[in-house]
Image: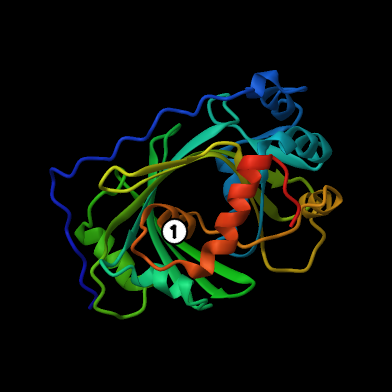
Amino acid sequence: MMKRIVLPETMEVPQFVEAPQRTTSWADLEPSLPHLLRRLAPISLDEMAEVALLDRSETKFVFHEDRLPELLAAVANEYRVLEINGNRLNHYRTLYFDTPEFTLFRRHQAGGRNRYKVRSRTYLDTDLSFMEVKHKVSADRTVKSRVKTAEFVERISPRTVAFLNTHLPANNWTLEPKLWNQYTRITLVGRHTPERVTIDLELQFVTNEGRAMRLPGLVIAEVKRDGAMHDSPFIRHMRAMSLRPTGFSKYCVGVSLLYDEVKHNHFKPQLRMVGKILQEGYYVN
């Protein structure tokens, strides 16, 4: 039986920093991001459930948001966009759990293929919340398991323990909250291909001690497919824009940025890439 820490009822949620000041805004771009998203046909949450892709392959791209108008214009006829209450820019908050010794992070740091992430997540636009376990089975396969929760999980409950015992290997792990993450997401669903694309913007990280980091201008795009070898219009357009796939973990990058005492040599190339994108606005890997 795995052991889990129970967080105190009085635990305070770290405060996220204000949105960064922009030299430009989405409304100033030609054409604007909201205007570009209006060119895509909408898809509802209920419809999107048919493309859940909990057992999938994942392909990630990292680039500057200045490239979004070109990209979204290119894929407008090949994808639908998630719309919730008329909003196509949706807001997420995530809390990652790990052991006091960062066992799950260290497994990533060591380059292990068979690894896990544990997180709670809330969709701020709908008040839906889930507890999730992501299992990286191999280089090209990820399995996500989740259970709906009554509210955003900030402490381990008996129901959470039962869920984690089912989806994590049998270890005497004591999990505790390690990193808060908030961002804005665009979700695309293929019209003719069984795939979902998430495009994450305005990333913020906060530790329990209040250390914070923003990554203004950075975009993390992830193509989720069922594992079958089929053409992806999104990946095709990314290649046409000289943007190539790259590994990127929000949790591991956030820990590497905010926990100096934790060894993170494995993620230094990703940190250099992020720095180059934010400084120069354009990066070809």
Query: Is 160 positioned to the left or the right of 34 in the image?
Result: left
The residue type indicated by label 1 comes to Ser
167 to 243, vertically: above or below: below
Residue in the picture at 62% in, 74% down: 139
Q: Nearer the viewer, residue 11 or 23?
A: 23
- Residue 218, how many percent across, how many down? 60, 42
- What color scheme is it? rainbow
Query: Is 97 positioned to the left or the right of 23 in the image?
Result: left
Q: Nearer the viewer, residue 107 or 89?
A: 107
Query: Is 228 positioned to the left or the right of 179 in the image?
Result: right
- Residue 193, how many percent across, how many down? 77, 54
Quadrant of the rendered image containing residue 259: bottom left
Residue in the picture at 59% in, 50% down: 274
List the single residue furthest toward the right: 240
92 to 248, vertically: above or below: above
Q: Quadrant of the N terminus?
A: bottom left
Residue in the picture at 78% in, 54% down: 235
List the single residue furthest toward the bottom: 170
* Label tally: 1
Residue in the picture at 66% in, 37% down: 65
In this figure, which residue is indicated by the disc labeled 1?
Answer: 256
Say what secondary structure mark 1 lies in: helix
53 to 26, vertically: above or below: below
Q: Quadrant of the C terminus?
A: bottom right
- Residue 14, how many percent across, how many down? 28, 40
Q: Circle 1: is it few (<14), some (14-19), or many (20+) Cα within 10 Å?
A: many
